[in-house]
Image (cartoon, grey):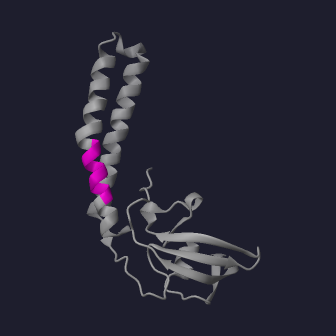
Amino acid sequence: MYNELTKNDIKKMREEIEYRKIVLRKELLEDVKEARAHGDLSENFEYHAAKKEKNKNESRIRYLERMIKTAKIVSDESKEDEVGLNNTVHLYFEEDDEVEVFKLVTTVRGNSLKGLISTESPIGKAILGKKVGDRVFIRVSGDAGYYVVVKEIENTVDDGSDQLRSY
């Protein structure tokens, strides 16, 4: 399975890889050396914690490199009047009689707690390509779901302020 990423997502990932390799790797190796100098490694908590952080950093680098290598590049351009990637959308939830605001992003940047909805999520899939005034059924499972109405679409520029999700 390929992750759908924009050119900006890949740029951010490369920047993170560079930071982790040039800055963080050096700091973490220094921490390991310093902790090793404290004596008996079998009972040295600092050494084990430093090694764990170093390995975590290396794992994150490999993960990001693999994501870039297997990525499918998608465009974040959309028609002016349609919901597309990086658009901010105001949705009216009929059952709750509430309007909520979401920004549609790629999977790697999705964070529903911050209002960043992935295009792979049920809401994201359902509203992608819709227009203001469209009533859309969001399928949760089987026949279960709910209706939303697209109230407003803001064509927002991807300024890079959304963080990549880390695992």
Q: Quadrant of residue 147?
A: bottom right
Residue 1 seen by the camera = no
For this orientation, the residue located farthest to the top is 39
* Nearer to me, 143 or 21: 21
For residue 129, side relative to residue 91 (left or right): left
For residue 11, side relative to residue 100 (left or right): left
Question: Does the magenta segment cover residue 34?
Answer: no
Residue 103 seen by the camera = yes
The number of discs equals: 0
Q: Which residues are magenta?
A: 12-20
Question: Does the magenta segment cover residue 14?
Answer: yes
For residue 104, side relative to residue 69 (left or right): right
Tell me residue 70's x, y (percent). 29, 65
Name which residue lies at 43% across and 68% down: 106
Name which residue lies at 31% across and 56% down: 13
Q: What type of secondary structure mainly makes up the magenta span?
A: helix
Image quadrant occupied by the N terminus: bottom left
Tell me residue 65's x, y (percent). 28, 55
* Nearer to me, 83 or 140: 83
Name which residue lies at 29% across and 13% down: 37
Tell me residue 31's x, y (percent). 32, 24
* Nearer to me, 162 or 47: 162
Tell me residue 42's x, y (percent). 39, 15
Where 32 sits versus 10, above or below?
A: above
For residue 41, side relative to residue 115 (left or right): left
Where 98 sits versus 21, above or below?
A: below
